[in-house]
Amino acid sequence: MNAPRIISSANLIISGLFFHAIFLAIAIPSVVVDLRSFRIPDIIVYPGIVTLSALLAIAMPNQLVDSLIAATLAIAFLWLIRIFTKGLGLGDVKFGACMGLYCGTHAIFIAFLIAAISGILVAAILVNRKKIMRTARIPFAPYLALGALCARINVDFFCR
């Protein structure tokens, strides 16, 4: 007879911190590469999706379905923006899957709002100071990562 598995609060904290670290391990190289080349490589994003999904399934199974729904919503939302504005690359859409897995449904749209506002503010400042032209391309991964981190930490802090 197997005893029910009890997950201690210490294990939950450790798995939560590990989850944040995994997202940072995906986000930081994605941001650096996007800033340099306006691309987010599949070699970073695909293993990140698999790793986040596996960690959710193993350490936080109660959040798995919610996070998969959020990843699907993120892909759909970013794909629509890509189609209608032609301003996002496919790497941004794939990175959105990582964001959805990381944020869950409770924070993904807050993450997009933070990303949009911060991206618009930085672009407006750069255009105003004549550092870039109004039609210049701007890498969006830094703002997506910032939005995801701020939204997830905010929701973790205030809602749990």
Image (tube, rainbow, N blue to C red):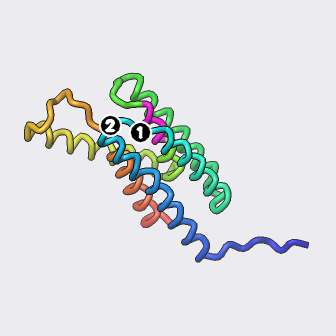
Give the left or right position of residue 62, taking residue 106 as reference.
right
Residue 81 is situated, as x and y percent measured from the top left of the image, at: 39, 29
Q: Does 23 sit above or below residue 97?
A: below
Q: Is residue 41 magenta?
A: no
Q: Which mark is residue 40?
A: 1
In the image shown, does 3 or 113 lie closer to the viewer? 3
Residue 110 is situated, as x and y percent measured from the top left of the image, at: 40, 49
The structure residue drawn at horizontal position 27% and vertical position 42%, both measured from the top left corner, is 119
Give the left or right position of residue 46, taking residue 136 as reference.
right
Q: Which residue is mark 2?
A: 37
Quadrant of res 88: top left
Name the element at disc 1: loop
Residue 116 is situated, as x and y percent measured from the top left of the image, at: 31, 41
Q: Residue furthest right?
A: 1
Residue 117 is situated, as x and y percent measured from the top left of the image, at: 28, 44
Three-letter amino acid code of the residue under disc 1: Ile
Give the left or right position of residue 71, taking residue 31 as reference.
right
Quadrant of res 130: top left
The structure residue drawn at horizontal position 37% and vertical position 45%, both measured from the top left corner, is 144
The structure residue drawn at horizontal position 16% and vertical position 30%, both measured from the top left corner, is 134
C-alpha separation, residue under disc 1 versus residue under disc 2:
8 Å
Name the element at disc 2: helix
In the image shown, does 85 or 36 lie closer to the viewer? 36
Rate crowding at label 2 as few (under 14), some (14 to 19) or many (20 or more) other CA atoms within 10 Å: few
Three-letter amino acid code of the residue under disc 2: Ser
For marks 1 and 2, give the one nearer the viewer: 2
Number of numbered discs: 2
Give the left or right position of residue 103, taking residue 69 as reference.
left
Give the magenta range. 90-96
Magenta-highlighted stretch: main secondary structure? helix
Rate crowding at label 1 as few (under 14), some (14 to 19) or many (20 or more) other CA atoms within 10 Å: many
